[in-house]
Amino acid sequence: MSKERKDDKTKSAKTKAPDLLNRLEGYENFLQQLKDQVRRSQVKAALAVNSELISLYWELGKSIVERQERAGWGDGVLDRLSNDLAVAFPEMKGFSRRNLYRIRALYQAYRAESEFVPQAVAQIPWGHNILILEKVKEPSERRWYVAKATEHGWSRSILGMQIETGLYKRQGKAITNFSNTLPALQSDMAQEALKDPYNFDFLTLGTEAQERDIEQALVDHIQKFLIELGVGFAFVGRQYHLDVGDQDFYIDLLFYHLRLRSYVVIELKGGEFKPEYAGQLNFYLSAVDDLLRHPDDKPSIGLLLCRGKNRFVAEYALRDINKPIGVSEFTLTDSLPEKLKGQLPTIEELEAEFR
């Protein structure tokens, strides 16, 4: 094929798509409507204000979806919209083809719930919304992460970590006797504060690690441990000493929960749950309530963290215990993905850290 014919074919391919889009009936009027929406939003408030930005994106997404459904326009129109809106508003970011797809996805995700942008969605940054839209597909789960991100002020990285570790499916899932040992409101709050299982993969200790190794590593990585425990936990101490009847006893990990207004006693067990563990923890809770609890504090709560548990055995063990106790499993990394090997501390480095 001659060079001239190749050039003619290339020119034809370049002009074919614009010619097709030029035949979109009503496109120019539709583009003008979107420009007007942007200008009205600029008048109301600076687009740096997050709620106004999300509201604008909601309206743009709604207009795009409704016009595509009514006129039968394909996704190719988003390319043209991206170029034309970027030319009309050169000072603004957010009109890339990729972001227009996200804007449309925002409206499609929540349109069944509300004609207007959901209030909670408008309260979290656009980057948070993108993360939830791309990583979470179930509507009820999406709403849950939106609500929790708003309630706790999660950063985008923390939100991403909570999604990756499946917090939605773990929160409030511990086996407990709270309904029998705590007032209704306190019981619901305490149940929500616990999860099952707890994910300690950040320790990179391996499944062969012993109880004291895990305990020490959790304290060494207290910031990540507190994030995994959840909002409200304040660290009090490790191997916390109790003097009962002139005998010495030591609690593995002691916390205070700021929202529950109660001490939380955590005992780590390296193997499967055993009924006698509940009796031991019940004893510790009695001692903490007597020796540490302030008159304004709520009843202390116990949490047994075990490598594994039989649900029926745990439920039977807690049935007649008169102190509020929860039982959850914890997980450790068994083996590292290939892509992470060489990027994490060596055994020697970890040993040096724990000395």
Image (tube, rainbow, N blue to C red):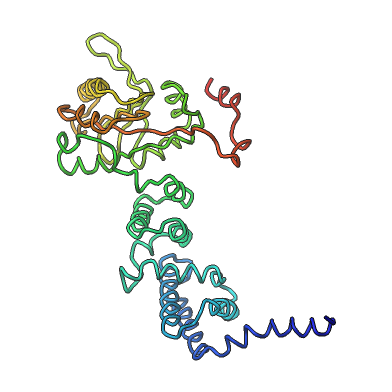
Say above or below: 130 vs 57.
above
The quarter of the picture where the N terminus appears is bottom right
Name, please, the residue furthest toward the right.
Answer: 2
Q: Is residue 13 left or right of residue 21?
A: right
Residue at (34% x, 21% y) in the render: 240
In-front residue for pair 227/100: 100
Residue 232: image location, x then y, percent: 33, 40
Which residue: 14% across, 27% down? 320
| Residue 261 point in image, percent of width and height | 25, 37
Q: Position of residue 195 (x, y in %)?
A: 32, 40
Q: Is residue 247 left or right of residue 86?
A: left
Q: Tell me: 92 left or right of 55.
A: right
Q: Residue at x 71, y 85 (%)?
A: 12
Identify the image quadrant of residue 263.
top left
Q: Tell which of 211 and 274 is nearer to you.
A: 274
Query: Is 127 above or below relative to 241?
Result: below
Report the label total: 0
